[in-house]
Amino acid sequence: MRRDKRSAYNAQVVVDGQSGLIVAQGVSADTTDHLQLLPVLEQTWEVVGRTAVDTVADRGYRSDRNVGEAEARGDSVLVELFEREGERSTRSGGAGGSRSRRRS
């Protein structure tokens, strides 16, 4: 039996909530979003000069690395926490920290 292999891409966008404009974007061949949050936050910083007061992301972006690094940078990232099997979660969590950051 022959199996077709298809290329798949994973696209990310950051949209400004007030203007509706795309301020950062990225495309990768990664199968998950785990490694995609930090690059688009960095790109947002480079393009706009700041990141959102609170960046909201789905739980596909939730990883200790993403949350820890974002917190170290001073970015606030809100993501849904992982659910335990059989539990339903409506809580949010993520990196706290200051609302602005200073780059050297």
Image (cartoon, rainbow, N blue to C red):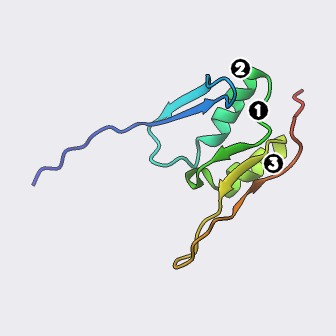
- Looking at the image, the residue that sits furthest to the left is 1
User: From mark 3 to mark 2, how far is it between C-alphas?
Assistant: 20 Å
The reply to whether dot 3 and dot 2 touch (C-beta < 8 Å) is: no
- Residue 58 vs 52, above or below: the answer is below
Amino acid type, callout 2:
Val
Q: Which residue is mark 3?
A: 71
- Give how far across and how far down residue 1 sits, in percent: 9, 55
Give whichever of 17, 84 is nearer the camera.
Answer: 17
In front: label 1 or label 3: 1
Callout 3 crowding tier (Cα within 10 Å): few <14, some 14–19, many ≥20: some
Q: Secondary structure at mark 3?
A: helix
Which residue corresponds to mark 2? 47
Residue that numbered label 1 is attached to: 51
**Residue 34 screen position, x and y as percent:** 57, 49
Q: Are marks 1 and 3 in contact (CB under 8 Å)?
A: no
Residue at 82 percent across and 41 percent down: it is 73
| Horizontal and vertical percent position of residue 44 | 70, 28
Left or right placement of residue 57 versus residue 103 in this view: left
The kind of residue on which mark 3 rests is: Glu
Q: How far separated are the C-alphas under marks 2 and 1?
A: 10 Å
Q: Is residue 31 above or below residue 87?
A: above
Element on which disc 2 rests: helix
